[in-house]
Amino acid sequence: MSAMIAMQIITVRTPLIRIERPVPQPGPGELLIEVAACGVCRTDLHVLDGEIPARYPIIPGHEIVGLVAAIGAGVEGFAISQRVGVPWLGHTCGQCPYCQAGKENLCDAPLFTGATRDGGYASHVIADAHYCFDLPDRFSDVGAAPLLCAGLIGWRALRLAGPAPVIGLYGFGAAAHILAQVARHQGRTVYAFTRDGDEDGQAFARSLGCEWAGGSSNDPPAPLDAALIFAPAGELVPRALKTVRKGGRVICAGIHMSDIPSFPYADLWEERQICSVANLTREDGTSFFELAGDIPLHTVTETFRLEDANDALQQLRTGKIKGAAVLVP
C-alpha cells in the first residue's frame, strides 16, 4: 500500500476527519506496523475533548494490534509479519529518577500513543520497538485489541488493590469486563456497579462471574476490601469510600475524572486509602499477557470500520457499547 489512511483529530471537540498521506518509514529504534485492529478507549474521548494533554492534529488510538511491516535501524528481536501490540505508553526517557527507579509509568518526559504521538486509528502506525508487546496467540486481532489498555490498566489497578478478596468495580465497561474475569480466576469475589437502572449492564456483569451487580448508588451485599473506579465520575470516590472496610482502598483507574466532592474525614479514617493509577510499565504488560494467555479470558467486542470512528466514539460516550469497541481498517 502506497498510502496511509487515518482518522485524525484536527482540533478539540470536532469530528475526526479521514486523511491520506504517504506510508511513513521507521526511524532508528522504531517499527512500522500495519494495523489490523485498534480499540476505542475512553481516553480517546478525553483527547478529543481536550481534557488531557495532547498535541493537535493527532491520530488517536492506543490499543493497537498489527503486523510488523518494516524495521528501523538498531531494532532487534522483531521480524517482518510478526504480530505485535502497541499500548498507551509509547516512549520514556530512561534517564529521569522515575525511569531509573523502575517507575517508567511516571517518566518525566514520556510520549503517549494517540495523544502525543500518532496512534492506531489508521492503516499504519510507527511505534517505539521497546514498547511493543507479543500477544497471546489464542486471541484474534479484534479480541486482543482491548487488552492493550482496558486490560493493562485494569491489571495495574488490581495489583495496586493488593490481595483484596472482595472487590467492587465501578463502571462496567471495557476494563471492568476483562478485570472481572481475571479477578474471578484468582478466586476473588467481584461486585459490579453500573449506572443506576442499567439492567442490561448488570446482567452482562453477572454473565462474566460477578456475584452481584447493581447501580452505583446501591450498597454492595458486603463491605469491600477494594473499590476500583473506571468511570470518570469524581462523585463515585466518596461513594466508594463508604463501601470499603477499615484499611480498604479506593483505586481511581482513569486518566481523567471530574472533580471529587468534599466528604467527611470520618469516611477516610481507619486507614482507608485513595490512590490513582498512572499509565503502565512494560513489566505490567509482560505479566498481564502471560496471564491472559493462560486463563479462560475472553473479550466482548463490537467492531466498526475505521471510517466509522466518530460513530464508535459517540456510542462509547453514551454508554451504548457492551464490552469494547474496536476499529478495523
Image: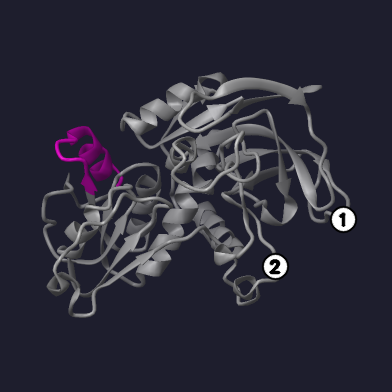
| Mark 2 / mark 1, whichever is N-terminal | 1
**Left or right position of 204 against 73:** left
Identify the residue at image location x=50%, y=47%: 147
> Visible in this render: residue 228?
yes
The 10 Å Cα crowd at callout 2, few under 14, some 14 to 19, many 20 or more, is: some
Identify the residue at image location x=81%, y=46%: 79
| Residue ID for mark 1 | 74
Q: How is the image coloured?
A: one colour
Helix, strand or loop at label 1? It is: loop
Where residue 285 sits, quadrant-wise, is bottom right
- Residue 69 lies, in percent from the top left, at 79, 36
Image quadrant where one finds the C terminus: top right
Tell me which amino acid carries mark 2.
Gly
| Residue ID for mark 2 | 94
| C-alpha span from label 2 to label 1 | 17 Å
Residue range in magenta is 193-208
